[in-house]
Structures are given as C-alpha cells and as structure tokens.
Amino acid sequence: MKLSKSFRLFAALTAFSAVSAVAQAQLKVGIDLSSTGPAAAIGITSKNAMLMWPKTIAGQDAQYLILDDGSDPGAAVRNIRKLITEDKVDVIVGPNITPAALAALDPVAEYETPMITLIGSASVVEPQEGKKVWAFKMAQTDRAMADVMTRYMANHGVKTVGFIGFADSYGDSWFNEFSKFAELRHIRIVASERFNRTDASVTGQILKLMAAKPDAVLIAGAGTPTVLPQRTLVERGFKGAIYQTHGIATPEFIKLGGKDVEGTLFPTQPVVVARTLPADHPSKKAALAFVNAYEAKYGPGTVTQFAGDAAGVYPRLQDAVARALKAGQPGTKAFRVALRSELEHAHELVVPNGVVNTSATDHVGLDQRASVMGVVKNGSFTYLSQ
C-alpha cells in the first residue's frame, strides 16, 4: 500500500527508533478487535488505523493478523488463543472493550505473550502483578480522565452530579474513579444508575436521576449506546450540563445523536481535537499528521480517539522491538519476553494521543499531556480550555 505524504510525516514524527538490518524473521502481530456488535464504532476505526501501518517494524517484515470478536469477551479469548497457539504471534494488540481485555489476561499470561490493549479502564494493568504484567494499554486511564473532568466541573460551578453508567466493568471503573475525584473537589453524587449496552430504553433510570435534581449528569459509557441516555435526558427536559466519557469520540456518536448531543462535555485525548489544540501542545504535530493522513484515506470527520490509540501502537512497537531484537528473533520465547520488558522502557515517546513514559509499575505511561477537555460544537469535537 502506498503511504500518503501525511502518513509518512506521522511515521517520521512518532517512530524514532528503527534498525536498518535486513529482517531475519517475520514479526507476527495478532490483533483482536470488536469490528461488529455494540462496540463496532470503536473497533472499525481502530482497524482502519492499523491498515495504515507500514509493512515493517524496526526493520523486520511484519504480518498483521486481524480477527473480529463481535464485541463478545468469550470470542475475544478464543481469538487470542488461536493467534498465540496456532499463528504463533509475537504480540497481541487489542481487545478494545474492557470485559474482553480482562478475560484475555488468562491466555496472554499462560503463553507469556505481551498484549497492548486499546481500552480505557486501567483495571487490565493495575496493579502490576500476576497476569497483568503481560498487559499494556494505549488509552489514557479513566483515573486521569476523571481528574480533568472533575476539575472542569469544579471550575464551572457543578456541585451535584447524577451518574448513569454501563452495567459492566467500564461503568464500574468510571464510577470508582469519578467518585474519588468528585469527593476531592467537593462534588456530590446525588443519584447513580446503570444501563446495558443493548438496552432499548433507559427512561426509568433517567427519571430517577432527574428527580435528584443534579447540576449535571455524567453518562459513563462508550460508543453509540451512550446516545440513548443523553437523548432521553433531553427529551425529558433536563436543563443541566451533560458530560460523557472519552469513550464517545466517534463520528457515529454525533451522527446518531444529532442535536441531542450538541454541547456535550467530555474528556478526551489530542487526536480528537487535534485541529483546535493549542499550538504548544507536545502532541499536536503528531496528532495533526495522523488526522490528516487518516481523513485523506477515510474521509473528512472520520477520525476517532480509538483510531489515534491504534495509530500509537505502531511507534510503541517500533520503539520496543528495536531493543528486543538484541535478545532474540521473532517467533521465540526469548523475543516475547524481551519485548514485554522493552515495552516498559518507553521514554518521552511522542504518539498521536500523548507522550509515553512507561516503567515496571506503569504500563500506560501517559501523563496529563494526554488529557484535555472537549465539547461537541456545531456537530464537531472541539478543544475546550479549562
């Protein structure tokens, strides 16, 4: 595939580690994504970004094997076991939903294969012990996003919040992290409800939230299922601010939500608001280069945070593989073990969605440079200053 000028710039900005030696063995990257099912809006854009990856990583010929789990954690585990045991991959990328990533810890630890997930929750990498030492994560943590969100709330007079989140580990993680920062900033959660990704109605939950008369409502979900509670709030006449998490940042959210999601406040990462970021943001150059390349291929307004996370996997691998090759060739346990170790040693690595500094205790490596506030304005995701 011929690379665009913008993508060549993106690769040059982010992939600073490379080797020029002739490849001795093919590097196999096993990829599990939710390209269908409720999380398809996330998985499809992640896959699109991966289809733009160069055909070599750190001088090694690379083979990308992509499977769809249908947004089903059980299918994700089966896919990952197949990729590891039959296809003999050197690293797993994905899954992109939290329940699947947690379930995938078993096979990656069993077969000592590093996994770079695309989920928001830090539960797959914290604490760094047991099976979790084999897992890494591209997206900013729920903790960091809850921090920037509650800071914005406090700065804009929010004293009480109604919470409605997914009835799964994503909703659990967000409630736990949001609660901590809400308490820190003297914001009171006056009602808490849950909903399923496949629910057709959330009227009962929304009426309970509104009865508590909160200043704002936080919807803790991801992808297009998050439109339903927001639309119900609007239809029922809620006049307070509506916040969502970083999981909403897809064109489908705006397309499906229409006028009902205008004004939505949400924490996000640089790619989503790349064009409106301050000029001095450290990831602006890399984020813009990726956005321009992605939209040149897939159309204006198509980029998502999830595409940005997926794009960032490539420089993460490029950086770590270059060093891991000193310990062994792809296809060997020595290489997989070394790759896991070297993924812990990224230093000031600029990727489209932030700057990465990993360690043995931090398998995310993103600081507040990867967390910004956004707003849906005139049908677009726009940077919002604190």
Image: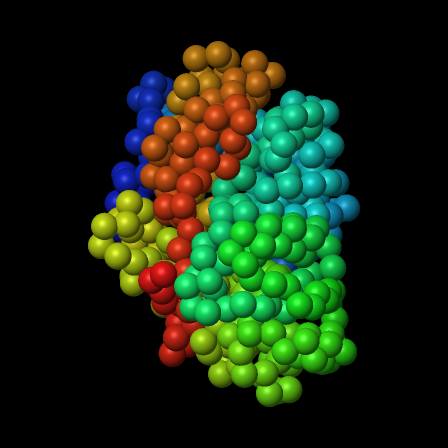
Rendered location of residue 31, percent (x, y): 58, 41
**Viewer-nearest residue: 265 or 55:** 265
Q: Residue at x 69, y 28 (%)?
A: 131
Q: Is residue 326 above or below residue 108?
A: above
Q: Residue at x 29, y 61 (%)?
A: 275
Q: Residue at x 45, y 76 (%)?
A: 263
| Residue 46 shown left or right of residue 130 in the figure | left
| Residue 106 shown left or right of residue 300 in the figure | right
Q: Is residue 18 above or below residue 182?
A: above
Residue 268, by quadrant, is bottom left
Residue 227, by quadrant, is bottom right
Rendered location of residue 381, percent (x, y): 40, 67
Q: Is residue 20 visible?
A: yes
**Viewer-nearest residue: 16 or 371:** 371
Q: Residue at x 37, y 46 (%)?
A: 369
Q: Is residue 255 visible?
A: no
| Residue 240 shown left or right of residue 162 in the figure | left
The structure's colour scheme is rainbow
**Viewer-nearest residue: 243 or 348:** 243
State the quadrant of the C terminus.
Answer: bottom left
Farthest left residue in view:
279
